Image: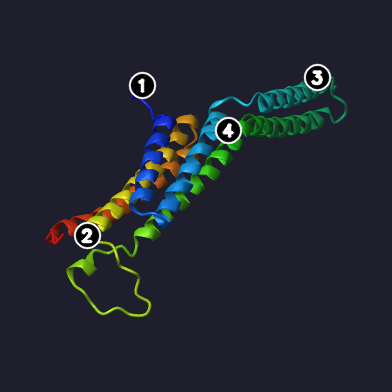
Amino acid sequence: MYTELELAHVQETLGNLHSRIVERFPGSGLGQVASELCSIAQETGPILERLRRPSWTVRVLVGLAVLVLLALSGGLVALFGTLSLGDDGLGSVLQAIESAAQDLIFLGVAIYFLLTIEGRLKRRIALRDLRRLRAIVHIVDMHQLTKDPEHLLAQGDRTASSPRRELSRFELSRYLDYCTELLSLSSKLAALHAQCVNDPVVLEAVNDIEVLASNLSNKIWQKIVILDTIPRLE
């Protein structure tokens, strides 16, 4: 029960987080990001099931193609066995051996290509979904970018292009904490793909998302630590 992630629990946690964000910051962009992540989580279920389930159509077609290739190679071997030595028989046999060796190499490459089709198709599906999660991680980072606690420490002159800083200390702390939770849940959705596909490219993509989310979360927690040093005025 506790040896792997469960999509249903991740979806439940994400749904609760979305409700908390909307209730605390109604109409905020962060709430819309959480809503989009909830939609991705709902779409992840069928994707994971597709990755976990064997594709019998692809396997049958690949099996037939491999049988055809083996039959052709068997025909070539039988044809080679009927060759007889003539005046230049040795040269002909050597040429036939060289040609047969090349054919066997191409045959091996073709069979390997066919046997890995299913894995490459699943890899493409997983990477497409992982790219969406990676984009969400960057979008969360964009939303916390201007949420700087420095304005609570020192009030400076605003410029025409200065971002709006209307959040109180408590609200800013909650906002940053919600960002870290969104980053964590994004990495958990990515990790679910690694449970269904044993592919080095997918595993590397999942690891990249987890490292990115962790680094951004650490950056946000530095802001939260700064907030904790501000005297409580409210």
When the figure is inspected, residue 109 is found, relative to residue 231, above or below; the finding is above
What is the distance, in whole Å, between disc 1 and disc 4 at their CAs? 27 Å
- Label ID, residue 78: 3
What is the distance, in whole Å, between disc 4 and disc 3 at their CAs? 34 Å
Upstream in sequence: badge 1 or badge 2: 1
- Foreground of the two, 174 or 148: 174
Q: Position of residue 10 (x, y in %)?
A: 40, 35
Q: Amino acid at mark 3?
A: Ala
Residue placed at 34% from the left, 45% from the top?
Answer: 20
Q: Position of residue 135 (x, y in %)?
A: 47, 52
Upstream in sequence: badge 4 or badge 2: 4
Q: Secondary structure at mark 3?
A: helix
Upstream in sequence: badge 3 or badge 2: 3
- Label ID, residue 119: 4
> Which of the two marks, 4 or 3, is nearer to us in this view?
4
Residue placed at 66% from the left, 25% from the top?
Answer: 59
Q: Amino acid at mark 1?
A: Met
Q: Amino acid at mark 4?
A: Gly
Specify few, some or many for label 3: CA neighbours under 10 Å numbering under 14, 14-19, or 20 or more: few
Q: Secondary structure at mark 1?
A: loop
Residue placed at 35% from the left, 71% from the top?
Answer: 163
